[in-house]
Image (cartoon, rainbow, N blue to C red):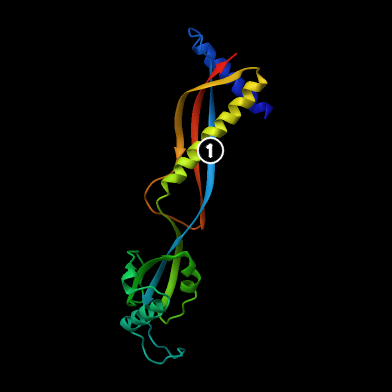
Amino acid sequence: MKKTIQILILTLIFSTSIYGQSTERFIRIIGNAKKEIKAEKVKVYFTVSELKATKHSTNKEDLSYENAYSAVVSKFSELGIQETDIKKAFKKRNNFNKINSKNFYIESDFNNLEKITNTVVAGFRITDSKYLFGKTDSHLETELSLKAIQDAKRKAKAICDEIKMKVGKILNIEVKEGDFSSRTKESKENSTIKTYKVTITFKLID
């Protein structure tokens, strides 16, 4: 804390010297806020492939791609997932054996992830899964911005108490960081940290 105060005091002195022509003194403080957000949906990538019977196969007959796909659709319907929820995933794959195989993905509620990953159907194989984070509630951005401002005020007061001055009015607020885009994001982690950072310039009073 002492090291931080020393750095900020130097910033104050530097700022005052630059604007020596003015009697107004100020200090710039960075305010931070963060909150953990849990994923509500998952995106599961999978393949559906035909199966060629071999002498080691349990089933001595070939399984066509069409039959494998129908079995997957039927199994998913038991989980409340409709065929219209199955989307094609355009992934480049090396298919040296010339097997009829296609890539898909589904987006589903977080609670269905375990059921989907435990699905056993001939010709069905999960290749990847991601957690989805959509557009953040606008109230969260407001909440974090206010917390960041309060954090800056707290730091400013602590420093002013140390240098025997008082925190005056806010002269300027600049948002440095705030990730609140409306695009859906994918992550391998089931939670993410939303952050908000502001730089606030406070007037100093003797």
* Front-lying residue, 48 or 117: 117
Residue at the disc numbered 1: 147
Residue 37 x %, y %: 50, 52
Would you place residue 113 above or below residue 121 in this image? above
Asked whether, in this view, residue 56 is left or right of residue 47, the answer is: right
**Percent coordinates x, y for residue 78 in the rendering:** 41, 79
Work out whether residue 86 can be spotted.
Answer: no
Q: Which residue lies furthest to the top in this view?
A: 21
What residue do we see at 42% from left, 88% from top? 54
* Percent of width and height locating residue 155: 60, 29
Picture quadrant of residue 71: bottom left
Going by the image, does 1 lie left or right of 138? right
Kind of residue indicated by mark 1: Lys
Q: Dot 1 lies on which element?
A: helix
Q: Are there few (<14), some (14-19), or many (20+) residues within 10 Å of tag 1?
A: some
Q: Who's the residue at 61% across and 20% down the image?
A: 9
Vertical placement of residue 100 versus 173, above or below: below
Q: Which residue is at a point 55% across and 16% down the rendered structure image?
A: 14
Q: Quadrant of the C terminus?
A: top right
